[in-house]
Image (cartoon, helix red, strand yellow):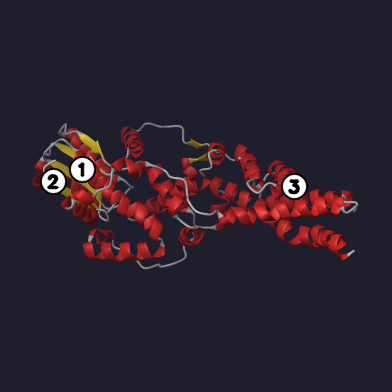
Amino acid sequence: MRRECLTIIGTAHVSEESVNEVKDAIYEQQPDVVAIELDRGRYTKLKQQMMGIETDDTISVTQIIKENKVGLFFTSTLLGYFQSKIGEDVDVAPGSEMIGAIEASEDLEIPIALIDRDVNVTLQRALNKMGMMEKTKFAYGLLLSVFGFGDEEDVDIEDLKDSEKIDELMEMFKDEAPSVHEVLVHERDAYLAGRIMQLPQDKVIAVVGAGHKPGIMQYLDNPETIPNLESLEIIEEKKGIPWLKIILALIPITFVVIFFLAYFSGINIAGNIYEFIIISMIMGFIGSILSGSKIQSAIVGGLVAPLTIIHPLLAAGWFSGLTEAKFRKVKQSDIKNLTKIESLRDLWNNNIFRILLVVVGTNLGVSIATLVILPSKVFIPLFMKIFGG
């Protein structure tokens, strides 16, 4: 790639003006290669969309939970929701400017280079870097936006390509979620710049989001600052002391210790064990059924509740949620329909929301049992018998 022959087009991903700008530039300049801000997975989906290919859009919730990708799934779903919602408001489908670039390139028989990092790697690296407070704050902000709370001020989509507006938005994003900003913006700026520099062709048009253009140009001006691209593709395990896991583990450990102390003190604990099991099962069942689950899901949630209280890495909600997923097949249409939700009835009829609600409801019921009912009804009385005589 020759820098003097490089054209970077910064686009708003849901802008009709961006679509026209991209197409016009490709037809006028006829570069050696068109580099687009897509990874292989997103490129394949866009190509299928362009060709009208229908694909099996059933989402395996079971697989998502087994692979421990629940947070990744819901993060990508919510981010996709926002882009789809904006695109619907301005009557431009997300990714339209990339489709425009692909169409113009294919029309002129110009090769296409995919220069973005795998989206799953990007999101997982972002989640791994976030602390618990940052995750909570970020999720809270996303959910508020989903349900229509927050800033209602109209935004001109074309303003999203203005450098001053971009700087302002990026600073706000950095303040709200610095770890996410680091991965989604700075890392990808470096990655995109590095991939552009690796292109063997001389004359290049690169189509990227407007928010990345300043960072990419800065890296291209200072190529020695670009890190090794392979290092940006590694998903590292989080470091540090997992305080939350330690705290969650201490609760069931405390319960087990009290049972053992009572047993070795000669106290008959059979009745207390039965109480523990019954209360746990009832609260798991109630939490699930009140969240609108099928009766089968509630039964499963109740049956596994005692075990999940003792095992800190298990949650009853996942079992009831997996059971619920057997009856409510989640499809891409459920994700798309999130943009069309206008009432509680619409929300209630969305399978993603219903399964998530069952997970949360079951876990809430079991949490009430663990933190309130069981201590007061079972463990504190046992503790008093042990040490109070």
Residue 291 visible in the displayed image: no
Between 326 and 194, the residue placed more toward the observer is 194
Q: Position of residue 59 (x, y in %)?
A: 50, 38
Res. 54 in view:
yes
Q: Is residue 199 above or below residue 183?
A: above
Can you tell which mark lies on residue 306? Answer: 3
Q: Which of the 4 image quadrants contains residue 104?
A: top left
Task: Say which mark, if any, is on residue 313.
Answer: none
Residue contact at pointers 1 and 3, CB within 8 angstroms = no
Asked which secondary structure carries label 1, the reply is helix
Instruction: Pick the quarter of the image with the N terminus.
Output: top left
Q: Is residue 302 left or right of residue 170?
A: right
**Residue at 74% across / 47% down in the picture?**
306
Which amino acid type is shown beneath numbered disc 3?
A: Pro
- Residue type at mark 2: give it: Leu
Q: Secondary structure at mark 2?
A: strand
Across and down, in percent, residue 5 comes to 9, 44
> In this orientation, which residue lies closer to the viewer: 209 or 12?
209
